């Protein structure tokens, strides 16, 4: 069988229950939300892509190089990241073809993964490619997609409209001038909504590389003297207000643990001063970061930004890869996490504060039913974040719903987040979530635990209202 004859069609009942009765119910629930606008409250798409609206260069730059889900699994099967264009900036045609060829040659390695599912949906529904990738058809599929990318219907803004995105949140450095967001806001031809998200991790960790240099830049852009702890805090507060003025509704935090023990004032002043001179110990740096995470919650109570936490990741696990290719190149690995005791200092102070929203993510499934859902089942501020990163898979999403609903119900979950740099994967990821939720709710109906009209209300809530509510976006369309 040649590669060109290996054709397939996306099955309309994909991801629905195998049981005929439940499958029929799932179809109806899915139809209710299939065309609803996409609310994407957490992701990593570059807003400059939409501001500039330049054509995508090639299939590899769209599907392979920016997507660490793809590159990490190819690397696991022996492909050098350099052959995938990682860390190389813009690729020439030869390099782009090589990266695409490597994906096609190793297509079988993606069987059973959500990556395979997303890519098949993207290729079929966006580009009309309905044959399996393999070495024999690598160049032909590259040319087919590249030809379409050259047309106006496949430029970033046109795809944004085609995908049905209502709001897209980006993830941004506190010192970013947000010029791309301002350009979109001020462009009369732009009808979408792209909002920044305040991501201060590197500014809260005195042991992070180049922390002192970052603090100096923070002081300059905020026009505040960060030579003192009070000035440092004031600069962060000022930059948060700048983000709010540019449309931000949330902050985003990812540290190794969730410690939030506050420091007494004199200790905060002392450790900050030591960090500026490079003499703070690792334990002192960790204590200061935990103190500042609680300060971020205090600031959220003051300025209204929702606070999203997705901890428990060992960043840049493989030093040689980090040195060669930099961060976000596929070797961030989950670590064990404790939530209940770690967040108690923060929640005792701010957990019942009116208007405070704390969205808790995890890559440790055992935490859903044991710690996170019970917290959300008591604290008005706490929302259970969607299955994230290693867990945004069909089976893990099903397990998530069953794990958290008993303690927190449906209304204390935060909707779906795509968490992606791969622009074309956004509709595929959201559609996967809607299909899986339809199947879960169909099971509730089939077991006579919900009436079908209630399940319909819930799936609309999960798709639209919950992400808007948790991340403080406007109410449902």
Image (spheres, rainbow, N blue to C red):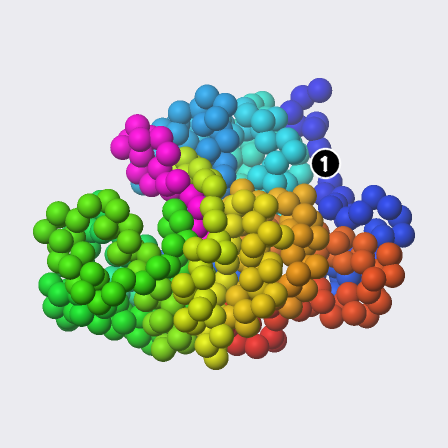
Residue 287 vertical position relative to residue 61 in the rendered view, above or below: below
In the shown orientation, is residue 373 left or right of residue 74? right
Figure quadrant of residue 333: top left
Q: Which residues are magenta?
A: 310-328
Residue 311 vertical position relative to residue 229 in the rendered view, above or below: above
Q: Residue 325 colored magenta?
A: yes
46 or 304: which is nearer to us? 304
Residue 290 visible to the viewer = yes
Secondary structure, mark 1, is loop
Estimate the x, y position of residue 176 in percent, counting from the top left. 27, 61
Estimate the x, y position of residue 227 in percent, counting from the top left. 11, 63
Residue sitting at the far right: 21
- Quadrant (top left, top right, bottom left, bottom right) of the C terminus: bottom right
Estimate the x, y position of residue 347 in percent, counting from the top left. 45, 66
Name which residue lies at 45% across and 40% down: 335
Residue 246 visible to the viewer = no
The crowd level at tag 1 (other Cα within 10 Å; few <14, some 14-19, many 20+) is few
Residue on which disc 1 sits: 8
Name which residue lies at 47% across and 59% down: 42
Name which residue lies at 22% across and 67% down: 265
In the shown orientation, is residue 430 left or right of residue 243? right
- Quadrant (top left, top right, bottom left, bottom right) of the N terminus: top right
3 or 360: which is nearer to us? 360
Figure quadrant of residue 129: top right
127 or 74: which is nearer to us? 74
6 or 28: which is nearer to us? 28
């Amino acid at each position: 069988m040649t590669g060109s004859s290996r054709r397939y069609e996306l099955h309309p009942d994909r991801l629905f229950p195998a049981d005929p009765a439940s499958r029929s119910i799932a179809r109806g629930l899915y139809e209710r939300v299939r065309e609803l606008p996409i609310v994407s409250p957490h992701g990593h798409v570059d807003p400059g892509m939409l501001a500039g609206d330049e054509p995508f260069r090639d299939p590899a730059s769209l599907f392979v190089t920016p997507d660490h889900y793809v590159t990490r699994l190819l690397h696991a099967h022996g492909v050098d990241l350099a052959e995938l264009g990682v860390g190389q900036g813009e690729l020439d045609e030869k390099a782009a073809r090589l990266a695409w060829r490597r994906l096609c040659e190793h297509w079988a390695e993606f069987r059973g993964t959500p990556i395979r599912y997303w890519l098949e949906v993207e290729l079929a529904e966006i580009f009309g490619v309905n044959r399996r990738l393999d070495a024999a058809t690598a160049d032909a599929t590259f040319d087919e997609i590249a030809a379409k990318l050259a047309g106006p219907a496949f430029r970033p803004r046109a795809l944004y409209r085609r995908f049905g995105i209502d709001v897209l949140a980006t993830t941004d450095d506190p010192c970013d001038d947000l010029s791309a967001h301002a350009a979109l806001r001020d462009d009369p031809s732009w009808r979408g909504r792209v909002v920044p998200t305040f991501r201060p991790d590197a500014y809260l960790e005195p042991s992070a590389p180049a922390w002192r240099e970052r603090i100096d830049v923070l002081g300059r852009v905020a026009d505040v003297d960060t030579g003192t702890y009070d000035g440092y805090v004031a600069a962060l507060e000022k930059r948060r207000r700048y983000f709010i003025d540019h449309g931000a509704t949330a902050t985003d935090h990812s540290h190794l643990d969730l410690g939030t023990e506050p420091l007494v004032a004199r200790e905060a002043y002392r450790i900050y001063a030591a960090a500026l001179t490079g003499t703070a110990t690792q334990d002192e740096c960790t204590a200061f970061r935990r103190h500042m995470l609680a300060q971020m919650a205090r600031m959220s109570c003051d300025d209204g930004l929702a606070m999203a936490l997705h901890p428990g990741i060992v960043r840049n696990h493989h030093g040689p890869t980090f040195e060669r290719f930099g961060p976000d190149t596929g070797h961030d690995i989950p670590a064990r996490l404790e939530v209940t005791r770690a967040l108690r200092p923060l929640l005792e102070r701010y957990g019942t504060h009116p208007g405070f929203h704390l969205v808790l993510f995890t890559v440790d499934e055992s935490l859903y039913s044991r710690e996170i859902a019970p917290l959300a089942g008591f604290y008005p501020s706490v929302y259970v974040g969607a299955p994230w990163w290693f867990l945004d898979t069909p089976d893990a999403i099903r397990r998530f719903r069953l794990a958290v609903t008993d303690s927190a119900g449906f209304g204390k979950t935060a909707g779906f987040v795509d968490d992606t740099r791969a622009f074309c994967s956004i509709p595929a990821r959201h559609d996967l979530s809607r299909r899986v939720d339809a199947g879960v709710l169909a099971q509730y109906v089939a077991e006579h635990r919900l009436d079908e009209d209630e399940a319909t209300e819930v799936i609309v809530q999960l798709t639209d209202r919950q992400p808007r509510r948790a991340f403080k976006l406007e109410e449902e369309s």
